[in-house]
Image (cartoon, rainbow, N blue to C red):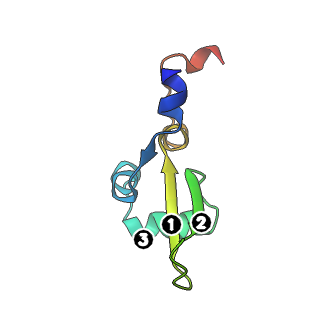
């Protein structure tokens, strides 16, 4: 159960950018172009035209960075 909660944990764009060594705008561009799979790009609910939300998930970010969590080696 705790592992499932951790898998769905979200990371801020700023935090992901720090961990990836990129500027936040670089993370946005890479995600929009599908160059990195660390979450999802979704239209903002506010309906302000081209505005998007960047949902970044800890498990996907860790996998992209090559970090292995305890218990993952068994799967």
Q: Nearer the viewer, mark 1 or mark 3?
A: 1
Label 3 residue SS: helix
Determine which of the numbered discs, if any, sits on residue 21 in the image.
Answer: none
Secondary structure at badge 1 equals strand
Q: Identify which residue is drawn at 45% across, 46% down.
A: 10
User: What's the residue at 47%, 63% (across, down)?
Assistant: 27
Q: Position of residue 55 (x, y in %)?
A: 51, 56
Q: Residue furthest front?
A: 46
Residue located beneath label 2 in the image: 42
User: Residue at left 55%, top 65%?
Assistant: 30
Q: What is the count of numbered marks?
A: 3
Q: Is residue 29 visible?
A: yes
To which residue does mark 3 refer? 25
- Does the CB distance between marks 3 and 2 fall below 8 Å? no
Q: Is residue 13 left or right of residue 43?
A: left
Q: What residue lies at 38% left-to-right and 57% top-to-bottom?
A: 17
The mark that comes first in sequence, 3 or 2, is 3
């Amino acid at each position: 159960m705790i592992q499932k909660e951790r898998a769905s944990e979200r990371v801020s764009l700023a935090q992901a950018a720090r961990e990836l060594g990129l500027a936040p705008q670089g993370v946005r561009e890479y995600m929009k172009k599908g160059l990195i799979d660390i979450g999802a790009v979704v239209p903002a609910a506010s309906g302000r035209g081209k505005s998007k939300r960047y949902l970044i998930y800890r498990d996907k970010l860790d996998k992209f960075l090559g970090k292995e969590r305890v218990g993952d080696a068994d799967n």
